[in-house]
Amino acid sequence: MLTAILLPPPAGIEPEIKALINDNLPVVLFDRYLPEVPTDYVGLDNYKGTYEAVAFLASTSVKRIALVTLDSGQTQMLERQSGYLAALKKYRIKPLILKVPFENDTESTIKQTTQFIKDNPGLDSIIFATNYLALSGIKAINESGLNIPKDISVIAFDDHDVFNIYNPSISAIAQPLDEMAKQLFKTLLDKLENKVRIKDLSKVIIHPDLILRGSTK
């Protein structure tokens, strides 16, 4: 039997996935799913990731917690924003959201984030919805003359090797990649070995790890 794994599905791929399903091929999506196309899926609890990050920041008595995210309809971005908003509501904190265009280059993101910080004086913490937004955001924070974590705490969604090299090191909401890979291939092998029918779909959600480093108070 032929196999299809998409890691992760890019925008506009729905017709191709539907064609694979119509050919009775197993399709397992990773990282994000497509609401209009039912498939097997292995992903992260993005909602809980940002919710727990906000809860931690609130426990350190910060009052102005911003989210820098992508202006995107991708499911994982929407879930991360939903978790952020739900936690802010619980802690009665006003939302501060910057949505960066998906097509932005690095310099444009730095400029936009710098202006966002300028427009929100007293901002004391930022959650970045992706690690590459965090890399641009840290430069924007430095160019704004702010000290991490004395003036502003930082948490990035998705860990990155360089986060341990920064001074201070950067806190992150990390994906347990080994566990996700294990679940991904288990789902696929179950279909290949006919342990589970192709039409019986599963959705496996993995809990993220909040790794606290020097960038949070």
Image (spheres, rainbow, N blue to C red):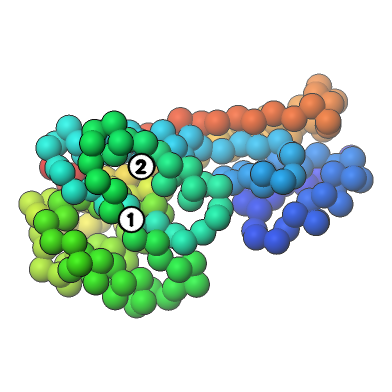
The quarter in which the N terminus is drawn is top right
Q: Quadrant of residue 15?
A: bottom right
The answer to whether residue 190 is left or right of residue 168 is right
The residue positioned 89% from the left and 40% from the top of the image is: 24
Q: Is residue 42 above or below residue 116?
A: above
Q: Secondary structure at mark 2?
A: helix
Task: Give the image location of residue 175, x and y in percent.
Answer: 45, 40
Q: Residue at x 74, y 39 (%)?
A: 38
Q: Is residue 99 above or below residue 27?
A: below
Residue type marked 1: Ile
Q: Nearer the viewer, residue 215 or 122?
A: 122
Q: Amino acid at mark 2?
A: Tyr
Q: Residue at x 41, y 46 (%)?
A: 81
Q: Is residue 49 something one can see in this rendering?
A: no
Q: State the residue position of label 2.
A: 84
As drawn, is 129 to the left or to the right of 189?
left
Front-lying residue, 73 or 57: 73
Residue at (83% x, 32% y) in the render:
198
In this figure, which residue is indicated by the disc labeled 1?
A: 97
Query: Quarter-wise, where is residue 184 in the image?
Result: top right
Pointers 1 and 2 in contact (C-beta within 8 Å): yes
Among the two numbered marks 1 and 2 on one chain, the one whose residue lies closer to the N terminus? 2
Judged from the image, the secondary structure of the residue bearing numbered disc 1 is strand
Measured as percent of width and height from the top left, residue 176 is found at 46, 36
